[in-house]
Amino acid sequence: MAIQWFPGHMHLTRQAIMERVKEIDVVIEVLDARLPGSSANPLLQEMTGHKPRLKILNKQDLADAAQTRAWLDWYNAQSETRAIALDASEPAPTKRLIEQCKLLAPSRGGMAKPMRVLICGVPNVGKSTLINSMSGKSQAKTGNEAGVTKLEQRIVLADDFYLWDTPGMLWPRIIVEKSGFNLAASGAVGRNAYDEELVALELLLYLQKHYAAMLEQRYKLGLGDAEIAALHDDELLALIGKKRGAVMSGGRVNLQKAAELVLTDFRDATIGRITLETPAEFEAWLAEGRLKDAERQAKKDARAAQRKRPSRPPRTEEGAVARAGQARAAGRPQAAAKAPKKPR
Ligand SMILES: Nc1nc2c(ncn2[C@@H]2O[C@H](COP(=O)(O)OP(=O)(O)OP(=O)(O)O)[C@@H](O)[C@H]2O)c(=O)[nH]1
Ligand SMILES: [Mg+2]
């Protein structure tokens, strides 16, 4: 099951960003520090890749600190990319961000050439919250669900520094299946676009492997790391449901309720500070996703070519003469073979 969510307002955002980016000096791409690779929008890269860009690994307070460092090192080792980590508890990120923007666009500044910055990223990643803490006012609407900001909004940070808040945007086809799951687990996908149980199971699969001790700590399963890792994800979800009282009459575990509990516990870091992908893991998923996508495209092209090909070979004069010969040999009357008329 691939998770896809690209509602109408995202189409409009895509067009708005394409227009706006022409007059922008720096693009700030807000990523989720728990899933930096999966929350990097390839569409955005395509539309804004020619502009200086700063990546912010936001919500670092929820992510695994060691993994955030690994991601920052990975990004900052790439040419033309600057990345910093941030979270909403930083009281005044403005100074740090303005410094970074000036490094990226040194010719901008002053009333004649104000710095124009576009803030974009996937839904619910904290763009509007960041803008509010930068401006020191609640100018942009925020909320803990995907799709709060619906329209682009300009915020004047100083006479020579403008920011544009944009609605969260995903992309029309998420080819890395794991990214769809991670985005849904983080809260970047609309509630009706995914199955909570499947997303929770996929999340548990990763946590079993990388954060088993945290699962034990949170859910008091009475199991060691290796035992947790060896459980089937279905069994683990049922066990968590039982421990947390998600039980229906008759004693059966309510798996939907258990899934919701796990997702909420992950989203607010009650399980602990967790990152769902390393740079190497993400690169491997991306390579696999691209391969599958190329195979899918090749099959689609082959089907289209088949549809275009005529079902019978076109009738040629030589073909008709040959068919007439075959009919004669078979003792059928020649008229049945419908030999072509000779030109007069
Ligand atoms: N823990 C934590 N929560 C954050 C942080 N930044 C934002 N949030 C919360 O994340 C939720 C989404 O924040 P918004 O600023 O509305 O996100 P957005 O990117 O503007 O979302 P859309 O407008 O839907 O695209 C809110 O509940 C914020 O309080 C952060 O650094 N850490
Ligand atoms: Mg917003």
Image (cartoon, helix red, strand yellow):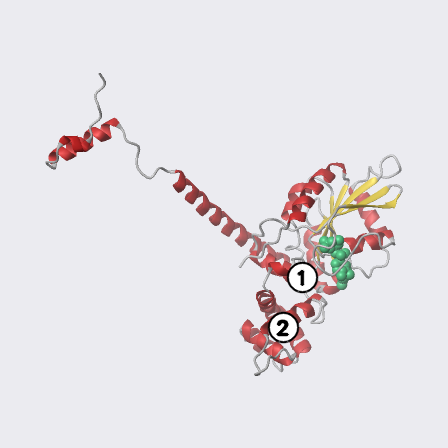
Q: Residue at x 76, y 39 (%)?
A: 24
Residue type, numbered disc 2? Lys
Residue annotated with mark 2:
257
Residue 99 rendering spot, x and y as whole percentages: 83, 47
Q: Residue at x 64, y 46 (%)?
A: 43
Query: Secondary structure under badge 2?
Result: helix
Instruction: Check disc 2: other Cα within 10 Å, few if <14, some if 14-19, many if 20+.
Output: some
Query: Mark 2 vs mark 1: which is more N-terminal?
Result: 1
Residue type, numbered disc 1? Ser
Depicted 119 relative to depicted 275: above or below: above
Horizontal side of residue 336 vs 141, given as left or right? left
Foreground tag (2 vs 1): 2
Q: Nearer the viewer, residue 185 or 343?
A: 343
Horizontal side of residue 188 vs 253, given as left or right? right
Q: Residue at x 51, y 49 (%)?
A: 293
Disc assigned to residue 186: 1
Residue 250 rendering spot, x and y as whole percentages: 56, 83
Residue 274 rendering spot, x and y as whole percentages: 68, 66
Disc assigned to residue 149: none
Residue 193 rendering spot, x and y as whole percentages: 61, 58
Q: Does residue 277 appear in the picture of this structure? A: no
Residue 203: image quadrant is: bottom right
Q: Residue furthest top?
A: 344
Q: Does residue 289 appear in the picture of this structure? A: yes
In what quadrant of the picture does the C terminus appear?
top left
Horizontal side of residue 217 vs 253, given as left or right? right
